[in-house]
Image: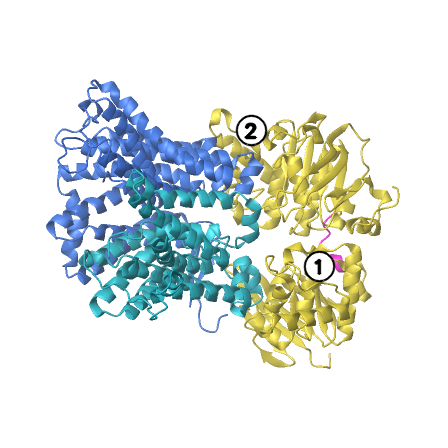
Chain colours: A cyan, B blue, C yellow
Amino acid sequence: MEPFVISVMIAATPFLFAAMGELVAERSGVLNLGLEGMMLMGAVTAFGVAFTTGSTVLAVAAGALAGAAMALLFAVLAISLMANQAATGLALTIFGVGASGLIGQGFIGQPLPPPVKLAIPGLSDGTMAGRILLGHDALVYLALAMAVAVAWFLARSRAGLALRAVGDSADSAHALGLNVTATRYAATLFGGAMAGVGGAYLSLAYTPMWGENMTAGRGWIALALVVFATWRPGRLVAGAYLFAAITQAQFYGQGAGLGVPQQVLAMAPYLATIVALVIISRDRALTRANAPACLGRPFRADR
Amino acid sequence: MILLEPRPAPSRLFSLASPLIAIALTLMASAALMAAMGRDPLAALSVYFVSPFQDAYGRAELVVKAIPLALIGAGLAVCFRANVWNIGAAGQFTLGALAAGGLALALPNAAGPLWLVPYLLAGCLGGMVWAAIPALLRTRFNANEILVSLMLTYVAGLLLDLLVRGPWRSPLSFGFPQTRDFADAFALPVLVAGTRLHLGLVLAVLACVGLWLMMTRTLKGFEVRVVGAAPRAAGFAGFSEARTVWFAMLLSGGLAGLAGAVEVSATIGKIQPDIGAGYGFTAIIVAFLGRLNPLGAALGALVLAVSYIGGENAQILLKLPKNVTGVFQGMLLFFLLACDTLIRWRLRLRRAGEA
Amino acid sequence: MTATPLLEARRLTKRFGAFTAVDGVSLAIAPGERHALLGENGAGKSTLVKMLYGVLQPTSGALFWNGEPARIASPAAARARGVGMVFQHFSVFEALSVAENVALALPPEPIRALSARIAQVSQAYGLAIDPARAMHTLSVGEKQRVEIIRCLLQSPRLLIMDEPTSVLTPQEAEALFQVLTRVAAQGCAILYISHRLDEVRALCDAATILRRGKVVERCDPRASSARELAEKMVGESIGWVARGDAARPGPVRLGLHGLSLPAPDPFGVSLNDISLAVRGGEVVGVAGVAGEGQSELFAALSGEAPVPQAAMVAIDGAPVGDKGITARRRLGAAFAPEERNGHAAVGDMTLPENILLSHHAAEGLARGGWINAVAARGWSDRVRAAFDVRADGPAPPARALSGGNLQKFVIGREVLREPGVLVVNQPTWGVDAGAAAAIRRALIALARRGAAVLVISQDLDEIFEIADRIAVLHHGRLSQAADASAMTPERVGLLMGGAHPEAA
């Protein structure tokens, strides 16, 4: 049980980063389907930097920058040039898969030292609770801290209020003098940076290795998580852990010798995502009440 | 400062020019990429974009590559026009290949030309069944079809893997996962001797032309366009959004499944873990390049076929990694989306002092 | 004017591409003045005022505040100078609370302190509102109060109101005037945009009249009659719409029997036990402020929303509640919804294609599934000729037409089918006076030819101009339809506000 819980906390971290970043972007009205591409670019960049410099901090920062750079590309197209947001997000993913594969050519199969884990003598390895709560690497805690920060930001801060307003009615926000474009750029870049960090965690800590397409759909699942959480940070944390549990269960299922083929177990997270989407989406009133009213719609200011 | 101003009517000039400008920009960016990778840009671009045309066999190969892209792309063009975002064509392709392949594997001793018909139909049906799932979940439960169809793509890939390594595995494969070869009855006839150009071409042409006629001349096509452009106007016209979602998904899924069956029969004659399902994603670019027009998709398919064949040639001749093709294709879509802006908006320079 | 004007515009011009919305307008507002800005739809009032508030930048011309040249670069800059604006289309955020909505227009301040200030201002001016309520639960009149409070909290020196009473009942409008009088008494100037002449004459002491983007007159509205002001606004005699006498009423052609329909989502309005009979030869008007169930009623009548029992809606006696819009059209009914962009017409499609939207089944334009493009084009040409629809070229996209022309096309498309029943929602919203008159004449003429015409409208003046009988929609319930001659605006206003009338 204990190793399962620990592995769940680790597995949840990339979901948490990517999905929370996307939640912020979506609350401002921007639908960025390019999460998969941004995560992969973050993963390959972080791996490359960690491999060449040995510094985890630099690697994570590089991953965040790579994600943000990809998001900038998206923002220019979808916000400034008002291109179709769904198509632009797809372009980002296709490009990200290809570019990350290209950059990562030289790193396939190369090993990396495992991440440094928090180790408080006596606490971290003494009790089960200690091991579960206090034995992780820094990014796991950072993810949770970030989640709390985002929740506070949206609910209590003035900037968060402005962001929510932009997602609710960009025209009204503009009429009141809020800078819609700047807000959406900032939210999108933040989303990209978080996706990049999520991807970085995969290649630095989850499996300290680079492999092509290593996100295996996590970016898409993170998108579904935002819907499943009805755009609320608290629910998103719960959802991330739930999905991580389902993802990890397949490994434990294999080990448990249930006689189910490995591929069927591997389907679990994807099928679970579909089920979760259906459960939430079927309540149309719930979606209408919580989805940012301007989600996915380009904004143009009258000048 | 450069400003965007709306045009009173979409620019026809840019509708046609935008893909060409996008291609040109992609070529320039690719040249820069080649240079950054330490290759002579002109030589590399020539291998990528000129070498596929150099001999008759090469040109036939281009068409062979374009066939599945055109089949899927034409279906997606219609689907996207309806504002139904079927991103899971790759999964539908896989299910089509599995359904048709399953039929072929079940009948190792089949003989005679008529077997192609049930084979291809099975492919269509396989794709349609897989596309029916997101259609159902969107119309009944309002679940986003992008995410559902994508999740199903991953599931389809795992299913393929399971079957090829498990119950369908050929006893003769010596450790390499693949099925037995299909009987000749399931091989698509070759149209031009000495090449691999096969009957799938006829299907692709029929699909592109037929869908174009449908979209421009029939009430069904009008219905698809109205539902995609303005759902409330569709209600006003008495068109059912749900019915259109089903139609779009089943059509594009069926064509993707057909492409899967065609491709597997024409190029490998059996099932193995890599059957070219990636075409399902590239076809998205094909559809956009073709302006979401089934005839345009045929042209777009040829353009992307060039990037594929060129990429294969470059891998052999220049030792360039195959990922470069993916990068080109992504860049092409980016440039296309950027250029498309100019169809509805025009650039205006704001002079200093003018507000 | 001897005193320095508070706000002065000199030769202000705004061009959008080739279109000049405001052309060399000069305007001066004295401190504490109640200044009206008059003009019909499309005269340029909203554009002018957006420049005064910093939402738009002028193409040329100058602004002066207190005699000093000023550049108002943004709404925040305008607010900093003491200009407040209440837009015609509210800038509200439905998902946020009242306090949060107000906070966004002000410099950062703790929510609790702000809520206290909101409560204080609302008391002082008689604008009752609860700061904690979610915006989407408020009525239109309440939302406007929030907008006004938002302005008042900044101690403005100039308050701009853009068509404020277009969404209010007559009684609510009266309450608004009292608020505005109190505001003016505190020394704040008011710039009041309207096309409602009686209001302007009651409230304002100065007026500037715009026509087609230019100033045509400056006067004291109290010294002119409404008719004089109207003629200056429009500049030509438009030909008043003559209702004439209702023909001997024919058989009931459109019947609503106890129509009840639950709202499809939390933001909608449920319809409750609506009964109405519209006879051939008459025009029945359904009045009501925005958001009382007009769209829901229209959808139930058109068939876009199915109703629980087939007998609830009947066309020429046949129950159609379970039938879709195409079946109803085949029975000779026609419909024109409120929203011409995206509902009645598809902006990117050509006019002939837009004909197909309502004609593909009932007018045989798509036999066997193949579109008869020639016939569609023929229809489009006929509608354009009959209704004087101005457009460039034979098949322009619908979005290239002006609001008035597109509306004439949309209504004309249905009227030319000579339907037995026509249901129209907001026939002349946002349409210039000439086109509005043409549309209203067409509706009356259709009725006099024997059709049953039902007009849902939020414009009381329009209802009184064309309806033979009037009913009022409030919170999804319909009052008894009464003869127009027995109704007065005050009585209708009471019904619009929910008061129950004495026995008819």
Depth order, front residue of B171/A39:
B171
Q: Residue at x 69, y 81 (%)?
A: C4
Above or below for A73 versus C115: above
What residue span does the magenta drawing correspond to?
A: C228-239
- The picture places residue A132, in percent across and down from the top left corner, at 38, 61
Find out whether residue C231 is within the magenta segment: yes
Q: Nearer the viewer, mark 1 or mark 2?
A: 1
Q: Amino acid at mark 2?
A: Ala
Depth order, front residue of A124/B334:
A124
Residue ID for mark 2? C361
Depth order, front residue of C318/C127:
C127
Q: Amino acid at mark 1?
A: Glu
Find out whether residue B53 is within the magenta segment: no
Above or below for A205 versus B280: below
Q: Quadrant of residue C134?
A: bottom right
- The picture places residue C64, in percent across and down from the top left corner, at 62, 77
Is any atom of residue B208 visible in this view?
no
Above or below for B66 versus A53: above
Residue ID for mark 1? C142
How many marks the image carries: the answer is 2
- The picture places residue A179, in percent across and down from the top left corner, at 50, 67
Dot 2: what SS?
loop
Which comes sooner in the sequence, label 1 or label 2? Answer: 1
Is any atom of residue C358 visible in this view?
yes
Q: Quadrant of residue C252?
A: top right
Q: Quadrant of residue A147?
A: bottom left
Q: Which mark is residue B156?
A: none
Image quadrant occupied by the N terminus of chain C: bottom right
